[in-house]
Image (cartoon, rainbow, N blue to C red):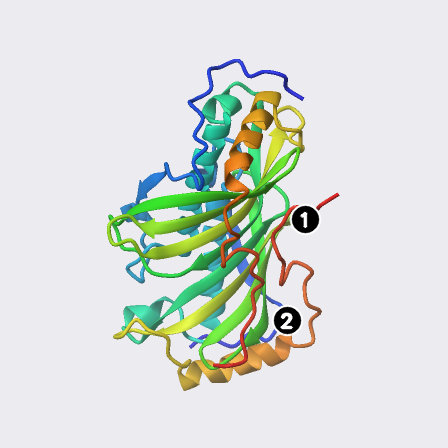
Amino acid sequence: MIDLDLGAPLDVHRAEVLPEWIDWNGHMNVGFYVVAFDKATDTLCQQFACGYEYTRDKIGMTFVLEAHVTYDREVKEGDPLRITTQILDHDTKRIHYIHMMYHAIEGYLAATNELMLMNIDYATRRSAPWPAFAMERIEKLAAAHAALPRPAQAGRLIGLKKK
Amino acid sequence: MLQTLPYELPELVTRAPLDTHRSTVLPEWVDWNGHMNVAFYVTAFDQASGAFMRNMGLGRRYVDGKLGMTFVLETHVTYDRELREGAPMRFATQLLARDAKKVHLFHEMFHAEQGYLAATNETIVMNIGYATRRSAPWPVPVAERLEAIWETHKALPKPAKAGRVMGLSRKS
């Protein structure tokens, strides 16, 4: 298990916009923002030992139940990305959290991704409580993140403003 | 505002919901859990948005002709059931609202053979001026088509999964 990082928000994930993530508009395609965010989810899950090895070793899986993305500014091929992660809430089976994606050099917010992630039993493919080793770490992470202000992008409702 | 478009528009489909888009889960969309990865649901839905845009007259030629683009501003996905490699999908797309520059769409993704709902996607798409890369009103022929589509879609009931705010219920 890796050392637990109780920095708030979690600020360890870095990435780069790959050529195959670019669409005919010349910027990162909407789907690949979510690819990038999903890799940041892997980074979060590694904190509580529910990353790739958790599934490879047939212990369990994590499934996303729901996702909300705000596309705030374009990023182009080769741009460096910094993704931070804040736990908003959790229970015995789920974590509710939000990723913020920044251009790592220019510093602007490129996108946000709010997610609901659920622990899944490997054999039944159904929801199951977090293993004790994971729950202990999730509690510590959530406690470290509890003092953070709630981002404005969390809990958004989609719609067109009526003028 | 563009008054015309320099290409022939496809035949307008006003059926509500729009049900023309079909797709298949590609091998590269499958992750280590053995099912379609969360991100590629968004890719698949984005292609369904593309089908809606083509019906409005905004396909590849709109971008290649340097006339304009469409950008997604915000998107919300519910993941309702897994899909495996090769699974056939069909989509139903409902126009929930529109204004001079944006559409508010709601997609449902179904397993095309087994019929179950796999996911939903609520999304806002905005028209963009090619040169400015900033928001711009729909071209006139597109706005006309949008009104014709709205006439048939406005009577549809609002989907139960539209307008969701994420959070943990306090039951479990």
Task: Let me know if residue B87 appears in the view.
Answer: yes
Q: Residue at x 43, y 84 (%)?
A: A133
Residue A86 coordinates in the image, percent (x, y): 60, 68
Image location (x, y in percent) of residue B60: 46, 25
Determine which of the numbered discs, if any, sits on residue A108 in the image: 1
- Report the residue that reaches farthest toward the top: B6
Q: Chain of mark 1?
A: A
Q: Residues within 10 Å of mark 1 (few under 14, many from 20)?
A: few
| Dot 2 alpha-carbon crowd within 10 angstroms: few under 14, some 14 to 19, many 20 or more | some
| CA distance for labels 2 and 1 | 19 Å
Q: Is residue A155 above or below residue A107?
A: below
Which residue occupies the foreground of this view, A123 or B147?
B147
- Letter of the chain that mark 2 sits on in the rendering: A
Work out whether A16 lies above or below B78.
above
| Residue B82 at x, y percent in the picture | 32, 60
Q: Are marks 2 and 1 in contact (CB under 8 Å)?
A: no
Disc 2 designates what residue? A8
Q: Residue at x 49, y 15 (%)?
A: B7
Amino acid type, callout 2: Ala
